[in-house]
Amino acid sequence: MFERVEILGVKVDALTMAQAVEKIESLISEKKSSLVATANAEMLMRATEDEELKKILNSAELVTADGAGTVWAAHHLGKNMPERVAGYDLVQEIMKISPKKSWKIFLFGAAPTIAEKAKLKAEELYPNIKIVGVRNGYFSAEDEPEIISQIKKSQPDILLAALGVPKQEKWLYAHKDELKVPVSIGVGGTFDVMAGVVKRAPLWMQKAKLEWLFRAMLQPSRAGRLIALPKFVLKVVMSKSSEG
Ligand code: UDP
């Protein structure tokens, strides 16, 4: 068992990328219907105002520290958090080893054609990968039975859902028992990046922990979401002082 660090009421697993991949491997072999979430500062902030999301995250089999903010928060609280395990990177690691493991992957989410493009990219990057199905993430309630049956028919080992936070977590949780996919992961904007529609920050910016700034510059519509970061820092600092 890994240590779980509670940040603003959400328990985040203190593990490295390699350990997260190992954990996913064991969840796949258990064949239970596990949920994996990657928690960045924005998600943790949202969970403070969304009890349902908080409950789902705390019931998830694995919650990784996605982003410098989450790692910082754990350290500020005096806890161990070995490294950042971002959703996009986790997906790449899983895809990389999936041909060897014969894992079947389903891509669900993002705008029409994006998941298909992400599939092509994955097939180019990871020869022999088995992407067994794709479905865009724009649907109404009436479409859901058809989406669920499409996913079930293709029998994936891993379901990657890119519907944004908290829609992806809530959708995966609501349909978990019905879908019976061993591992489902909410992956946010991962397909957009893989399809080349949204660019990932250059490595130097990632290393300088400035990925959030890059995303805000590229998609000004997201800039408003940046306010979540200072709010998050303040809340974590306050949660620590109220502890002591
Ligand atoms: N999306 C979707 N269905 C929706 C709303 C959003 O498939 O109803 C997709 C959107 O096209 C994008 C992803 O969900 O590909 C969310 O990306 P974002 O970077 O905003 O993720 P977050 O920051 O919420 O993790």
Image (spheres, rainbow, N blue to C red):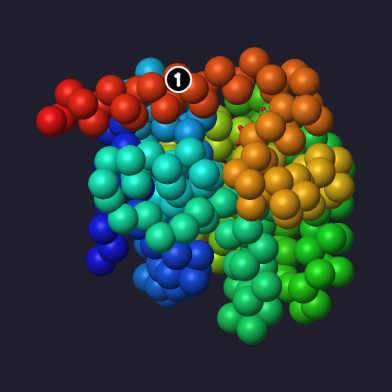
The tally of labels here is 1
Q: Amino acid at mark 1?
A: Lys
Whole-percent x and y of residue 157?
Answer: 55, 65
Mark 1 highlights which residue? Answer: 231
Dot 1 falls on a residue whose secondary structure is: helix
Quarter-wise, where is residue 95 in the image? Answer: bottom right
Q: Front-most of 120 and 67?
A: 67
Quadrant of image for the C terminus: top left
Whole-percent x and y of residue 129?
Answer: 74, 73
Quarter-wise, where is residue 112 in the image? Answer: top right
Residue at image coords 81%, 30%: 218
Whole-percent x and y of residue 188?
Answer: 63, 40
Residue at image coords 64%, 15%: 224
Q: Front-most of 179 and 17?
A: 17
Quarter-wise, where is residue 123 in the image? Answer: bottom right
Q: Front-most of 35 and 3?
A: 3
In the displayed structure, would residue 184 be above or below residue 167?
below
Q: Ligand 1: which quarter?
A: top right
Mark 1 residue crowding within 10 angstroms, few (<14) / some (14–19) / many (20+): some
Quadrant of image for the N terminus: bottom left
Residue at image coords 60%, 67%: 94
Q: Is residue 184 visible to us here? A: no
